[in-house]
Image (tube, rainbow, N blue to C red):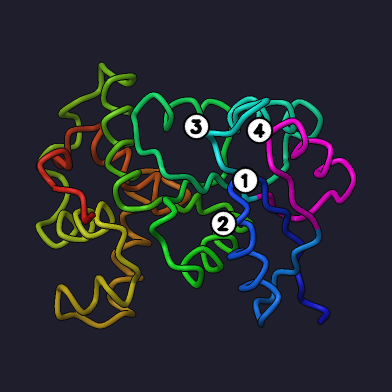
């Protein structure tokens, strides 16, 4: 398959690796080319395979995922590594972001959602589970100060609705259905928001809207 992308899975849970292996053998355009059971072995497998993307658990023996991600990025700063783990603790999320993770997903996600997220990660969109998205917002607020309020009142009510939908992890279609508007209209709103906030992705739109005081997303409960 000419459009196939390669992936390796690093997870100490054999049943989880079996789940990945089964799904990605059955029909995904991603081809599984390797796996490992701890972070150090994951680095070795990455060196051997040089895959398009790595799916990395964080809580593992020998070497945690965050350290493995840092090591991989010390060799290749453009390596694409997506965290797929059970933890949504702030410290774990912060460590993964600092290590340069390209996305952060929880193991509650379906395999089809993981499949789509890998495509998004390779496109630079930084996929995040809904609960993780709110953790990132909290971390951003704690780290970034000094500009709050400069955009307050400048977003239209509809644009604020769009940002709230982004915080819930909704797709363009999901936003359109929730707001009862056309999917093309959603795309136009996102394009205008990206221009207004000087943002390159949906995540940046969300974070900059929070940072600049345009909207309060911490009041939005997680979906899980």
Q: Earlier in the sequence, mark 4 or mark 1?
A: 1
Q: Position of residue 95 (x, y in %)?
A: 49, 25
- Residues drawn in magenta: 34-54
The residue identified by callout 1 is 11
| C-alpha span from label 4 to label 1 | 13 Å
For residue 177, which numbered disc appears in the image? none
The Cα atoms of the two marked residues, 4 and 3, are separated by 10 Å
Element class at badge 2? helix
Numbered tag placed on residue 69 in the rendering: 4
Of the image marks 2 and 4, the number of the one nearer the N terminus = 2
Residue beneath label 2, please?
Answer: 16
* Image-quadrant location for residue 151: top left
Q: Is residue 184 left or right of residue 64?
A: left
Disc 3: which residue: 97
Depth check, front residue: 75 or 108: 108
Residue occupying image coordinates x 57% and y 38%: 101
Return the residue nearer the eye: 14 or 116: 14
Residues packed near mark 3 inside 10 Å, few (<14), some (14 to 19) or many (20 plus): some
Between circles 1 and 3, the one closer to the viewer is: 1
């Amino acid at each position: 398959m000419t459009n196939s992308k390669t992936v390796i899975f690093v997870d100490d849970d054999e049943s989880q690796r079996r789940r990945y292996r089964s799904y990605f053998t059955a029909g995904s355009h991603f081809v599984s080319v390797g796996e490992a059971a701890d972070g150090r072995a994951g680095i070795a497998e990455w060196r051997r395979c040089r895959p398009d993307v790595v799916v990395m658990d964080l809580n593992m023996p020998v070497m945690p995922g965050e350290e493995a991600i840092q090591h991989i990025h010390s060799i290749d700063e453009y390596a694409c590594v997506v965290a797929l783990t059970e933890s949504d603790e702030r410290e774990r999320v912060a460590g993964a972001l600092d290590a340069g993770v390209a996305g952060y997903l929880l193991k509650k996600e379906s395999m089809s959602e993981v499949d789509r997220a890998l495509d998004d990660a390779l496109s630079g969109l930084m996929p995040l589970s809904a609960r993780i998205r709110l953790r990132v917002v909290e971390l951003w607020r704690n780290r970034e100060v000094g500009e709050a309020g400069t955009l307050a009142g400048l977003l239209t009510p509809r644009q604020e609705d769009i940002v709230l939908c982004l915080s819930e992890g909704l797709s363009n279609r999901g936003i359109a259905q929730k707001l009862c508007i056309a999917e093309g209209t959603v795309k136009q709103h996102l394009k205008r928001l990206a221009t207004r906030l000087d943002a390159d992705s949906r995540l940046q739109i969300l974070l900059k809207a929070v940072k600049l005081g345009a909207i309060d997303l911490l009041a939005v409960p997680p979906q899980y």
